[in-house]
Image: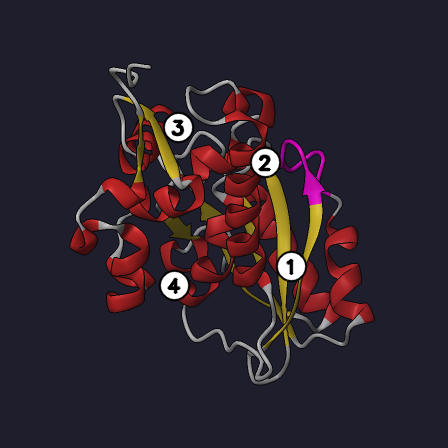
Amino acid sequence: MNEPSNPAYRIADLPANERPRERLERLGPQALSIPELLAILLRVGVAGESAVQVGQRLLNKYKNLAGLHRAPFEDLCNQRGIGAAKAAQIKAAIELGRRMAREPAEDRTTINSPADAAALVAYDMSAQEQEILSVILLDTRNQVIDIVEIYRGSVNSSQVHVGELFKPAIRRNAAALIVVHNHPSGDPTPSPDDVAVTRSIVQAGKLLDVDVLDHMVIGQGKWVSMKERGLGFA
């Protein structure tokens, strides 16, 4: 029987020094590109494409890992060379990364700058298709107590009830909080509603003796500290 003219490419068919799994073992996962990491999950390619090339094709289609995270499961299953099993592996791996980013360390994470706050939430929030408003609760040393989602949907001054936003802080005896919300458009430029909401939150914090340290707006790969820009903070 003749061999197929276009067999599926396997990682094992690559030269040993080019195989993602062996490169990971030798150099560590940080040395691999995203397509190579995806190739380890996929294990085999398809006719005419190696597993690395399939991984690159997925990245091209969905733009980045956040796009893969947002992609409907059924849509991912229908991509050439994927199917339900591989789609589940990809979704599970990205979800593990998302949860690890949110998992509290044995020693609580300390927020020393807006960049620290953004790093804590940007991976998850930038992947959301809906607008989400959360609060990062902090103790007296600016160590993270918890991250609590408050609203899901449009965040504007008429819909946000400021009292609801402070309930988790009061229940957990938080000394301070940082408000964070995303712009699904990818542009983190604060809107007039963002400024109005921030002004109300800051005033309420003074009355409740909970220090509002910042309001962060998260976009795609970018973020804005409204405190640094003096928007809504006296």
* CA distance for labels 2 and 1: 23 Å
Label 4 vs 3, first from the N-terminus: 3
Residue that appears at 37% across and 54% down = 229
The residue at which mark 4 appears reads as 115
On whether residue 57 falls in the magenta region, the answer is no
Disc 2 versus disc 1: nearer the observer: 2
Disc 4 versus disc 1: nearer the observer: 4
Task: State if disc 2 and disc 3 touch (CB < 8 Å).
Answer: no
Disc 4 versus disc 3: nearer the observer: 3
Residue that appears at 38% across and 36% down = 44
* CA distance for labels 3 and 2: 20 Å
The residue at which mark 2 appears reads as 131
Label 3 vs 2, first from the N-terminus: 3
* CA distance for labels 4 and 2: 20 Å
The residue at which mark 1 appears reads as 203
Label 4 vs 2, first from the N-terminus: 4
The boundaries of the magenta stretch are 151-160
* CA distance for labels 1 and 3: 41 Å
**SS for callout 3:** helix
Task: State if disc 1 and disc 2 touch (CB < 8 Å).
Answer: no
| Quadrant of the image containing the N terminus | top left
The residue at which mark 3 appears reads as 62
Residue that appears at 37% across and 29% down = 58
